[in-house]
Image: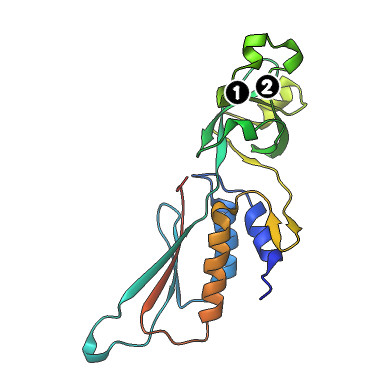
Amino acid sequence: MAINTELLSKICTTPGAPGFEQKVRELVISEVKDLVDELEIDNMGNVYAIKRGTAATDGERNKRVMVGAHMDEIGFIVTHIDDNGFIRFHTLGGFDPKTLTAQRVIVHGKEDVIGVMASKPIHVMSPEERNKVAKTKDYFIDTGMSAEKVKELVQVGDSITREREFIEMGDCVNGKSLDNRLAVFILLETLRNLKDQEIPFDLYGVFTVQEE
């Protein structure tokens, strides 16, 4: 069965670092609001898409089933901007530092700023430095802008996400944030498939925040 790769691509490429899920939440709400009986958002920003089941007999309350998928993706947060305009950061979620080299990122400041993960160039490293495994603290983000311009657009506390194209490769797809955006997609499609069907329980599709 063919899957809706256009929707999956949209879900994966929408930014939403932990604690900064606003845009992906808006996308989820727009997709799910017509598929369920009730929609609730709590103070944390979790989305509850509720499909009511057929009424239980003898006045008993329906049993409830929850299916959860977290909306956030691994990302970063700005911690410092130095005099050269380079951006230092902390990770939000678990990263293998080896995967960061030369990755493009988007810094979500007053406007989105494209940057690239950089570190000390290998040709100026000592032999000892070359033999060390890079750590996250060894990286910084270069936007190509002056320090003045960077500080105008970006401030400490802004979120950062990866900039990655979503592509199809044969029968597979490749892109960022398939953990856990693939589950978000599956939950949306499950609710879509159940839209006009009766079920013997109340189904809570919960799109959660800050899992990473």
Q: Amino acid at mark 1?
A: Ala
Q: Position of residue 107 (x, y in %)?
A: 65, 36
* Visible residue check, residue 24: yes
Answer with the quarter of the image where residue 116 lies: top right
The residue sitting at 75% across, 57% down in the picture is 169
- Residue designated by label 1: 134
Marks 2 and 1: which is nearer the front?
Answer: 1
- Residue designated by label 2: 119
137 sits to left or right of 118: left
Q: Quadrant of the N terminus?
A: bottom right
Answer with the quarter of the image where residue 180 lies: bottom right
Q: Amino acid at mark 2?
A: Ser
* Visible residue check, residue 33: no
Q: Are marks 2 and 1 in contact (CB under 8 Å)?
A: yes
In-front residue for pair 75/45: 75
The residue sitting at 49% across, 86% down in the picture is 197
The residue sitting at 60% across, 21% down in the picture is 138
- Give the label on residue 55, or none: none
Q: Could you say whether the residue bearing mark 2 is in a helix, strand or loop?
A: loop
In-front residue for pair 9/18: 9
Q: Earlier in the sequence, mark 2 or mark 1?
A: 2
The residue sitting at 67% across, 52% down in the picture is 13
